[in-house]
Amino acid sequence: MIYFILIIQTLIASGTHIVAKVVVEDIDSLTLTFLRSMIAAIGLVIIFLIREKRIRIEREDRLKTFFLGVLAIPLNQFAFLIAIGLTTPSNAALFYATTPVFVMVLSSLLLNERALLFAKIGVVIGFIGIAIVIFERGVDFSSEYTHGNLIMLVAVSAWGLYTVLGRPLVLKYGSFHVSALSMIIGAILFIPIGIVPAIKFDYSSIGMAHLYGLLYLGIGTSIIAYFLWYYALGRIESTKVAVFTYLQPVVTTILAVLLLGQIITIQFITGACIALLGVILVQSARHLLNIKNSLAR
């Protein structure tokens, strides 16, 4: 059952790259992030009051929950929407597919988790693949495409940190409690940043397609996909959850070619294969380490 849920989460996340690419063409990233977060926050507040009744976060975990809110919207979602306007949906999906690499690195740095040599090699290979895709159109740090790819790395780093730091809280308080609070906090934190652009925005330019896109991003991704991600984190370890992001580049690339007419280059395919090889090595190393630790007990 948990793996079926992860497949649904992956399909929603894969569609997010396509929908965001289309909507951000007509709604600037500041306004879009604000509207998306407000839709999600309103929905989550209603569900939270009905289901949870009260906030159960203990004093020692309040700062951690607050930081998850910072990661969720001001860093992850805002950086993602800026980047997706400058790069391609396939690139975005590929970078998010390297989440296990970021999870491993962050777990080693912050949680002092052991990393086998096998995993370290995988991290290096993964970042080589990412570098090939980042500079797919040449090493030009002044190009919007390169800027978009680099900003996407910020978004993925925030998502990896959100995954690593959020799992202990999910195990303690439950997936919905933590995901809902982090999204609500993130939305509140983004109000001072996005409210002025949102007020000044010309809403007469928005059609039904934009509204559907906003609902997809606000409800489909920010509520359902985030909850499913943390739900899975509460039942299996983070690296096993993160492995399902492998599917994102495949699904998103197919959708981008069919719906947006995106052209796939040899450099992208090469970089994607190398990056995913690195991710597989990281995952394999974590699996071997878990087996070794189990035998040691």
Image (tube, rainbow, N blue to C red):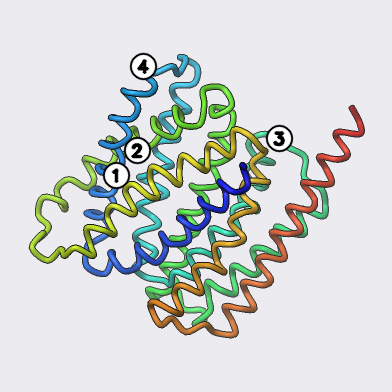
Which residue is under mark 4?
Answer: 54
Judge the density around disc 1: few (<14), some (14-19), many (≥20) Cα neighbours within 10 Å. many
Depth check, mark 2 against mark 4: the one in front is: 4
Secondary-structure class at tag 4: loop
Secondary-structure class at tag 1: helix
Secondary-structure class at tag 2: helix
Residue reaching furthest front?
Answer: 1
Which residue is under mark 3?
Answer: 112
Depth check, mark 2 against mark 3: the one in front is: 2
Amino acid found under the numbered disc labelled 3 = Asn
Work out how far the residue at label 2 is from the one at label 3, CA to CA, in angstroms.
27 Å
Quadrant in the rendering for residue 265: bottom right
In primary-sequence order, the first of circles 1 and 4 is: 1
Q: Residue at x 34, y 38 (%)?
A: 186
Disc 2 + disc 3, Cβ < 8 Å: no
Disc 1 + disc 2, Cβ < 8 Å: yes
| Image quadrant in which the C terminus is located | top right
Quadrant in the rendering for residue 210: bottom left
In primary-sequence order, the first of circles 3 and 4 is: 4
Which residue is under mark 1?
Answer: 37
Work out how far the residue at label 3 is from the one at label 4, CA to CA, in angstroms.
33 Å
Image location (x, y in percent) of residue 150: 47, 64
In primary-sequence order, the first of circles 2 and 4 is: 4
Quadrant in the rendering for residue 261: bottom left
* Residue 293 as seen in the image, left or right of residue 110: right
